[in-house]
């Protein structure tokens, strides 16, 4: 009988992987911003045109790439961030799969410029639909600029599936907020269609929240701080009287990574029990630090869902910390038998 199995060519494999990693322009924004942070940048610029459909560009002042690494960065499973499977549980970087750039380059026109500190000149690489068009010497500042143009140019079905510019822009801004909130010590600027939409100077966490959500936010914020052996919590919850109908301002960061967790969200709403009007949602901006060995980040392509070893304990600590903070600010009854 004839053998019928064959290995897919790289560009086909990349395009398939891209389906998971890149759902919309906002996914590109997330991946590029995370790479800039992993590169140690302290100033990051995001440039968007037409809701990211024609251009998503991220410029950072991080460590840059060598000529060879620039080329390699677009190969699948090419990463500088982990070497062994064990490293997955010691992660201090956002990335580790080495899939983002390969996926993005499979479905867009990409121009990368990069220079390392000690190099005189940098490298400029153009790659379209996984095919390298050119790589040349270029004069460019230290750091990396990646411009992603014409997303899904070779997958019309995907391109047509994109939502209106308003909706896609909303998704981009959500990603931008998440990354900017996780890193108040980094300066972020965002331009859309040539005008500046956000300018977030390096600051502390409270100031970053206020810069994003407006000066009125300042008076709403109640600090939450707790340190236990398994979990450190820092951040803020919104006072109950400011709670909103929408869930817009709910942020959990675990080890500086934005995550979604219905379970932990429940811990917060239960701490707020009896304090919120019907249908209102508490706002929160909470940073959780846990031992990286007690979480698994590698369960979801976009890494927004993670698995905790001991969710129940985290739930209890979180709930009690939030209750305590609300109590201290005389928002909840001061008697609290949970502590
Ligand atoms: P991952 O982030 O999972 O390693 P990516 O495909 O996003 O995979 O990036 C591949 C590699 O390219 C990274 O490991 C890193 O070495 C390099 N790289 C990507 N973006 C940048 C950047 N902005 N600055 C410096 N190096 C980068
Ligand atoms: Mg990455």
Image (tube, grey):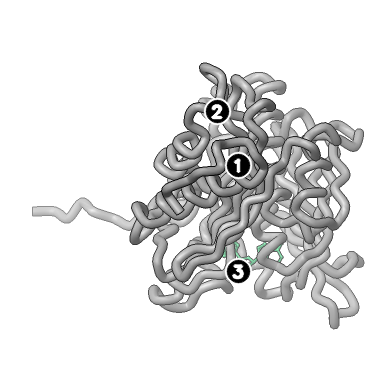
Disc 3 target residue: 72
Image coordinates for residue 244, horizontal then vertical, percent: 63, 23
Image coordinates for residue 38, horizontal then vertical, percent: 66, 65
State the separation of the CA atoms marked 2 and 3. 54 Å
Image coordinates for residue 171, horizontal then vertical, percent: 64, 32
State the separation of the CA atoms marked 3 and 1. 51 Å
Check if mark 1's residue and mark 2's residue have beta carbons within 8 Å.
yes
Image coordinates for residue 277, horizontal then vertical, percent: 56, 19
Tell me the SS state at disc 1.
helix
Left or right of residue 70, residue 332 in this image: left
* N-term mark: 2 or 3: 3
Tell me the SS state at disc 3.
helix
Disc 1 target residue: 326
Mark toward the viewer: 2 or 3:
2
Q: Residue at x 51, y 26 (%)?
A: 157
Q: Is residue 15 visible?
A: no
């Amino acid at each position: 009988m004839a053998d019928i199995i064959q290995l897919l060519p790289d560009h086909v494999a990349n395009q398939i992987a891209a389906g998971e990693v890149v759902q919309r322009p906002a996914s590109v924004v997330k991946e590029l911003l995370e790479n800039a942070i992993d590169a140690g940048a302290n100033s990051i610029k995001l440039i968007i045109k037409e809701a990211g459909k024609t251009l998503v560009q991220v410029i950072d002042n991080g460590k840059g790439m060598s000529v060879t690494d620039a080329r390699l960065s677009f190969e699948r499973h090419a990463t500088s961030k982990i070497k062994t499977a064990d490293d997955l549980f010691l992660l201090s970087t956002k990335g580790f799969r080495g899939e983002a750039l390969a996926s993005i380059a499979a479905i867009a026109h990409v121009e990368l410029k990069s220079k390392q500190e000690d190099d005189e000149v940098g490298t400029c690489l153009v790659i379209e639909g996984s095919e390298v068009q050119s790589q040349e010497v270029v004069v460019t500042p230290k750091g990396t600029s990646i411009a992603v143009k014409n997303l899904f140019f070779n997958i019309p079905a995907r391109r047509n599936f994109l939502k209106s510019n308003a909706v896609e822009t909303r998704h981009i801004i959500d990603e931008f907020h998440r990354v900017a909130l996780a890193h108040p010590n980094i300066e972020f600027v965002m331009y859309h269609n040539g005008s500046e939409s956000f300018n977030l100077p390096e600051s502390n966490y409270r100031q970053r929240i206020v810069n994003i959500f407006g000066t009125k936010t300042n008076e709403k914020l109640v600090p939450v701080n707790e340190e236990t052996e398994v979990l450190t919590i820092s951040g803020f919850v919104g006072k109950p009287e400011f709670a909103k109908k929408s869930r817009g301002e709910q942020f959990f960061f675990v080890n500086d990574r934005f995550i979604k967790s219905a379970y932990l969200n429940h811990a917060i709403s239960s701490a707020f029990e009896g304090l919120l009007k019907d249908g209102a949602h508490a706002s929160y901006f909470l940073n959780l630090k846990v031992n990286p060995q007690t979480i698994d980040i590698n369960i979801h392509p976009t890494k927004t869902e993670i698995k905790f070893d001991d969710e129940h304990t985290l739930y209890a600590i979180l709930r009690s910390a939030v209750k305590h903070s609300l109590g201290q600010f005389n928002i909840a009854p001061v008697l609290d038998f949970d502590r």
